[in-house]
Image: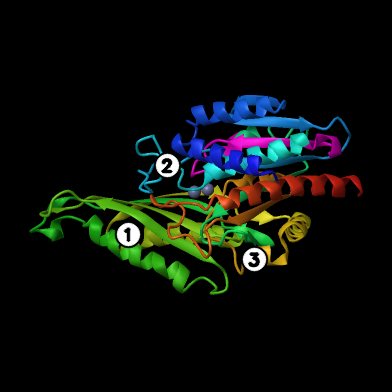
């Protein structure tokens, strides 16, 4: 890759970093991305699923269609990095590296467009809204982005400050967990704090339940089977001398196995109802399955590793010892078609000081060029491989 393209990718990322936008509101981002892709001469459609953008690079020769995906949304955080190109949007920050994802895919789009004469088939560049919690990928699929032309395979990257720059995290099988949502309302009965026997204390019932829920992971789950239950929010009561009648709890459950997901749903619901009724309270449980696990296709992870070792040497691949318990809506595409999702080390020499979603999170921008070159080479290797089979 030329130095000028590497600089361009960094400057794209810095621009997008300054103007972060929340899920389904990526209006400026979407305009910027679509404009860049149009200038490359690609066929661009925007306004998909709200703010999504899709560009097609058609080589004019028969062959498969592969998609390269980036996410565009930022997080509701006040940036505290102090960088000269820090967010100019109050309370919004690209703290998950999606600015870098877009920059890498735009860089790859430019490299592939310039190498169009050597390509066969087509390449679809998908820029989706709302990866964080809102499942923008689902909306893009419903809007038909995997059709006309039908996409045969998909590749995506996530910048990863926990890995050093120059290293790519790869995992065969499940690379990321599912993400399910649990909302519990514990209903008691209000009363005077001095006469607890006349009411039903929803706070005490919720406290028992919160403790009991831990058993589902620590005692009921196979220790070799990853599962996480985190209740991240609990609210109830108003004054010190009033027995609280309602407590609301909200949490997330992560797993890598469908059976585990179903068991957790059954047991969280059952335990909430039983523990609450044991305390004379009632529980109402809303339990929703969110993002599925992200599962890498066996052939595509092999091809990704071959591509990486030919570009950067075998030491550039770090085989992840286990699935990450974070989740990705990339999983929705990969439920429909074979796909591969890799982590791109961006932590500098060892690992970054701050994790993703932290207001001081930064990425080592040297990772961007490495990611873009990988994407462009992976796409051409994929086309070549498919042509010959
Ligand atoms: Zn994120
Ligand atoms: Zn992310």
Q: Which residue is identified by label 3?
A: 318
Q: Residues within 10 Å of mark 1 (few under 14, many from 20)?
A: many
Label at residue 313: none
Q: Nearer the viewer, residue 383 or 297?
A: 383
Looking at the image, which residue is at 45% across and 67% down? 216
The answer to whether the residues at label 3 and label 2 have Cβ atoms under 8 Å apart is: no
Q: Residues within 10 Å of mark 2 (few under 14, many from 20)?
A: many
The answer to whether the residues at label 3 and label 1 have Cβ atoms under 8 Å apart is: no
Q: Is mark 1 within 8 Å of ligand 1?
A: no
| Disc with the residue nearer the chain's start (2 vs 1) | 2
Q: Residues within 10 Å of mark 3 (few under 14, many from 20)?
A: some
Range drawn in magenta: 115-139
Q: Residue furthest right?
A: 388
- The secondary element bearing badge 1 is classed as helix
Residue 275 rendering spot, x and y as whole percentages: 34, 63
**Foreground disc of the pair 2, 1:** 2
Label at residue 276: 1
The quarter holding residue 77 reads top left
Looking at the image, which residue is at 83% across and 44% down? 383
The answer to whether the residues at label 2 and label 1 have Cβ atoms under 8 Å apart is: no
Horizontal side of residue 149 vs 17, given as left or right: right
Q: Which residue is identified by label 2?
A: 93
The residues bearing labels 2 and 1 have C-alpha atoms spaced at a distance of: 40 Å
Looking at the image, which residue is at 45% across and 54% down? 252
Horizontal side of residue 105 vs 65, given as left or right: left
Count the numbered circles shown. 3
Q: Nearer the viewer, residue 362 or 249?
A: 362
Q: Nearer the viewer, residue 277 or 157?
A: 157
| Disc with the residue nearer the chain's start (3 vs 2) | 2
Queried whether the magenta region covers residue 130, the answer comes back as yes
């Amino acid at each position: 890759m030329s130095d000028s393209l590497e600089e361009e990718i960094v400057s794209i990322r810095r621009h997008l970093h300054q103007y972060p936008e929340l899920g389904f509101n990526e209006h400026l981002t979407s305009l910027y991305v679509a404009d860049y892709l149009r200038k490359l001469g690609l066929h661009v459609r925007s306004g998909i699923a709200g703010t999504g953008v899709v560009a097609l690079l058609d080589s004019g020769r028969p062959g498969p269609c592969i998609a390269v995906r980036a996410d565009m949304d930022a997080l509701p955080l006040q940036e505290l990095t102090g960088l000269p190109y820090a967010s100019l949007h109050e309370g919004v920050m690209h703290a998950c590296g999606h600015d870098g994802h877009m920059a890498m895919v735009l860089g790859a789009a430019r490299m592939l467009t310039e190498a169009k004469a050597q390509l066969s088939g087509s390449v679809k560049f998908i820029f989706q809204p709302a990866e964080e919690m809102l499942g923008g990928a689902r909306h893009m699929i419903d809007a038909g982005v995997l059709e006309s032309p039908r996409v045969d395979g998909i590749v995506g990257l996530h910048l990863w400050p926990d890995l050093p720059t120059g290293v790519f995290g790869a995992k065969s099988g499940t690379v990321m967990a599912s993400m399910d949502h649990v909302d519990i309302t514990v209903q008691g009965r209000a009363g005077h704090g001095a006469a607890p026997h006349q009411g039903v204390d929803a706070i005490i019932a919720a406290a028992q339940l919160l403790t009991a829920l831990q058993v589902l992971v620590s005692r009921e789950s196979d220790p070799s089977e990853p599962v996480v239950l985190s209740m991240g929010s609990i609210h109830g009561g108003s004054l010190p001398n009033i027995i609280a009648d309602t407590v609301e709890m909200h949490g997330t459950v992560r797993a890598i196995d469908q059976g585990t997901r179903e068991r957790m749903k059954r047991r969280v619901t059952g335990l909430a109802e039983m523990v609450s009724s044991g305390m004379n309270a009632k529980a109402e449980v809303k339990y929703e399955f969110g993002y599925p696990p992200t599962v890498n296709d066996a052939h595509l992870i092999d091809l990704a590793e071959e591509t990486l070792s030919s570009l950067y040497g075998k030491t550039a691949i770090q085989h992840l010892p286990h699935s990450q318990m974070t989740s990705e809506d990339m999983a929705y595409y990969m439920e429909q078609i074979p796909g591969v999702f890799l982590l791109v080390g961006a932590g500098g020499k060892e690992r970054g000081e701050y994790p993703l979603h932290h207001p001081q999170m930064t990425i080592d921008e040297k990772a961007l060029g490495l990611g873009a070159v990988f994407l462009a080479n992976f796409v051409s290797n994929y086309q070549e491989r498919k042509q010959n089979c």
